[in-house]
Amino acid sequence: MSKVGANSLQIFQHLLNALEVNSNVKLNNQNHPNFKLQKYNSYFDLQLDNDVKSYLFAYPDAQINQLDSNTNLSHNSRALSIVEVLKYFYIKNQSNSSPIKSRSQFLELCNHFMVALNSNRVYNNIQQVKWSEWNVYWSTPDHKAICYSNCSGQCTESCAGGQCIYYFPQNELNNPNLPAKEKQDPNNSFNDSLFQIASIFNIFVQEEKSNFESFFFFTQKQEVQIDQLVQKQNEIQVEFLQGNVLGLGSLEELYKLEKSQIRSLSILTLLENSQPKGEEERKILYDFILSLHNLVSLEIQLEEGIYSIIEEGSSQDPHELAFYKEVPPAVVQNFVTFLTSLNIERLSLILDEFCLQASIDLNPIISHLSSLKLKLKTLQLSINHRRMSNAQHILLNICKMQQLEHLNLKIKYQWSYFHGTFGSIEEDFNKWEVQLKSSIKNLKSLKIE
């Protein structure tokens, strides 16, 4: 059961309290609340069971006619945002499915939450939506514990834009660690109603964000909100902490950027003259990536991305080679060392055993997947042109990655190509799914394609 389903009663009650509607909300056997909420063009109509009053929440310019003494009309923008939040949980409770079908709808409701929380923050990009619990308060995870113990009400933290926000329960006003200035000017943060809305926002983000947050920005380029660029082939793509995305044509351009501002990095197919030549140039790239202390996600391709068989000093045309040229083992081992040194949350790894006359031994890479750092929660693994006779080696090593929460394997086509038939594929990958879910206890989402 989702957290929404398990906490529907409390969620409805807290939101109705925030609307100053007193109701003892109960759920019947059909799991339906004892109130009705209808959306019209310019207002919401909220009707409680066994209550003669009707509550209308209208947009500022809405003209509502035929009001009677039993109608409570509100044009308050904050109340309207709370009702928008209530509508989401109401529909989800009624239909047992989310009414949100796009990232724009997700961001819209996130911003309604911000209005409901008396915050001036506006989310423009899904990557900006961060929310977590820090001991006794809800806030963005940009805040450190010292922010609470030393806060003077003049916070200088940027925290992804907007004012510094955090929500304590009312009884925290008596906390001896709370600065006196905050006790005198709580700025609406010390309010149990706001604290409960902040808690509800956390439930919403946990359940919905993963549905619309693509693994990496090469799959979400159509919905980049700020400085949107259409990603081109042979282009490095960088996402900054502020949410803007930049396309680069070479590694030299990448190295000139401010390291501390880089949040995500995508290095796929590069032009031949842009690929690092030799281990010295690859080491420069590895060291640069490892020095990005704010890096959250990385998308990287070994062949055509960071390896070229035309090494430094060579003039041979790869297309004229009669046989596949084996990549030196040291190249693969250095790549393994680089991968196991990464400290990121999301990794998209594209491996290709046979491409442009190169032959790469992927076994050392696959064998070390379980050695990736525990911070890694999301893995997207694409394996192209792979001889699938030892596919169990891949499966068994992924099963060891106990830290994973989200896993996307792009491997099914290669499996079908090896077997030469589509007849038994689903059965085989059903077994994969069962084994992965039983082995990786924290796994929340799994996709095999």
Image: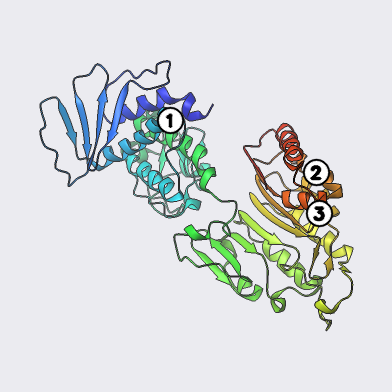
Image quadrant where residue 265 sits = bottom right
Which three-letter amino acid code belongs to the residue tagged 2?
Asn
Which three-letter amino acid code belongs to the residue tagged 3?
Ile
**Residue 341 or 326: which is nearer the viewer?**
326
Image quadrant where residue 273 sits = bottom right
The vertical placement of 212 against 438, above or below, is below
Answer with mark 3 or mark 2, whichever residue precedes in sequence.
3
The vertical placement of 341 against 312, above or below, is above
For discs 1 and 2, the disc positioned in front in the rendered view? 1
Regarding mark 1 in the picture, which secondary structure is present there?
Answer: helix
**Residue 397 or 279: which is nearer the viewer?**
397
Residue 329 seen by the camera: yes
* Residue position for label 3: 365
The vertical placement of 174 against 215, above or below, is above
Residue 87 percent location from the top left of the image: 35, 35
Q: How many marks?
A: 3
* Residue position for label 2: 397
Tell me, for residue 95, which label it has, or none. Answer: 1
In contact (CB < 8 Å): disc 3 and disc 2: no
**Residue 281 or 311: which is nearer the viewer?**
311
Residue 132 percent location from the top left of the image: 50, 39
Regarding mark 3 in the picture, which secondary structure is present there?
Answer: helix
